[in-house]
Amino acid sequence: MEVLKESIDPGEASAIALAIETPNSLVIVDDLKGRKLAKRMSLSIMGTLGMLLKAKQQNVIPLVKPYIDLIQETDFRLSQAIISYVLEQAGE
């Protein structure tokens, strides 16, 4: 895991290391470097907005937009293009 920490955020390095040890796992990672590394390692990945969309599709949450609004109040960066895409996919 030390090698992973040298190239990506420690939290993402931990998630990727755990996914390597856990067959058929899904890594939730948003950082581009982390996503690229996980893909190179043939891991299944999904981002935070993808998880929100999936939660709505499975009727776990009624709307995605309130969660996106909360995320935008933090230092988490989201492009308007991806927000628009996710809201369109969610039918919002």
Image (cartoon, rainbow, N blue to C red):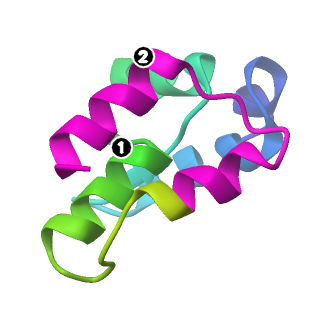
Residue 23 lies, with reference to residue 58, above or below; the image says above
Residue 13 colored in magenta in the image: no
Amino acid type at image mark 1: Met
Separation of residues labelled 2 and 1 (CA atoms): 17 Å
Residue 90 colored in magenta in the image: yes
Residue 19 lies, with reference to residue 83, above or below; the image says below
Does the residue at mark 2 contact the one at mark 1 (Cβ under 8 Å)? no
Q: Secondary structure at mark 2?
A: helix
Quarter location, residue 38: top left
Amino acid type at image mark 2: Ala
Q: Secondary structure at mark 1?
A: strand
Image point 80% across, 49% down: which residue? 73
Q: Position of residue 6 (x, y in %)?
A: 83, 22
Q: Mainly helix, strand or loop, the magenta region?
A: helix
Bounds of the magenta segment: 67-92
Question: Horizontal placement of 11 versus 69: left or right?
Answer: right
Residue named by callout 1: 46
For marks 2 and 1, the one nearer the N-term is: 1
Question: Horizontal placement of 72 versus 10: left or right?
Answer: left
In this view of the protein, can residue 42 be seen by the observer?
no
Q: Give the number of the disc on residue 56.
A: none
Q: Residues within 10 Å of mark 2 (few under 14, many from 20)?
A: few
